Image (cartoon, rainbow, N blue to C red):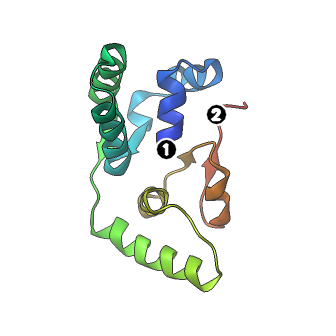
Amino acid sequence: MLDTNMVSHLLKEHPAVVRHVVAAPMAALCISAITEGELLFGLAKRPDAKRLHRAVSEFLRCVDVLPWDSSAAEHYGVVRAGMERHGMILAPLDLLIAAHALSIGAVLVTNDRAFSQLSDMQIEDWTDL
């Protein structure tokens, strides 16, 4: 599951990220509907960014966007409660994406170190490989 920041790196044609995406079967890549929302929010803030609109639209046509479901919600509740118990904080949308990845057993592809607070989270950073 690609995190929003990894999609951003892909759209900016980060060489290592592009290599990983090209090497992976498209069926193995996905994003959360939460990430789709973040991408669309970014576009709404930049209505005149035509190239960006085209790139995001093409990306969304090619990748599986997984819907938020009850399993993701269940994981969210457990993860958030556990983080609060341990005094840890994760940005709200990042917490939703993490819960979604955990609910489907996905590796979260991100370079956001904040996700490393979650011991059960499988993380890969494609920007430095």
x 54%, y 28%: residue: 9
In the image, is residue 36 above or below residue 10? below
Q: On the image, which quarter does residue 89 sit in?
A: bottom right
Residue sitting at x 27%, y 34%: 44
Compare marks 2 and 1 and give the one earlier in the sequence: 1
Query: In the rendered structure, which amino acid carries the disc numbered 1?
Result: Asp
Is 43 left, or right, of 24 in this rendering? left
Tell me residue 116's x, y (percent): 67, 58
Query: Which numbered circle lies on residue 109?
Result: none
In this rendering, position of residue 80 left or right of residue 43: right
How packed mark 2 is, by other alpha carbons closer than 10 Å (few <14, some 14-19, many 20 or more), is many
Q: Secondary structure at mark 1?
A: loop
Q: Is residue 34 above or below residue 91?
A: above
Mark 1 neighbour class, 10 Å CA radius: few under 14, some 14 to 19, many 20 or more: many
Q: Position of residue 96 (x, y in %)?
A: 42, 61
Q: Amino acid at mark 2?
A: Trp
Picture layout, residue 122 above or below residue 99: above
29 vs 41, left or right, is right
Q: Which mark is residue 126?
A: 2
Q: Where residue 20 appears, x then y in whole percent?
A: 58, 26
Of all residues, the one furthest to the right in this rendering is: 128
- Which residue position is annotated with label 1? 3
Q: Where is residue 45? Give x, y as percent.
A: 32, 34
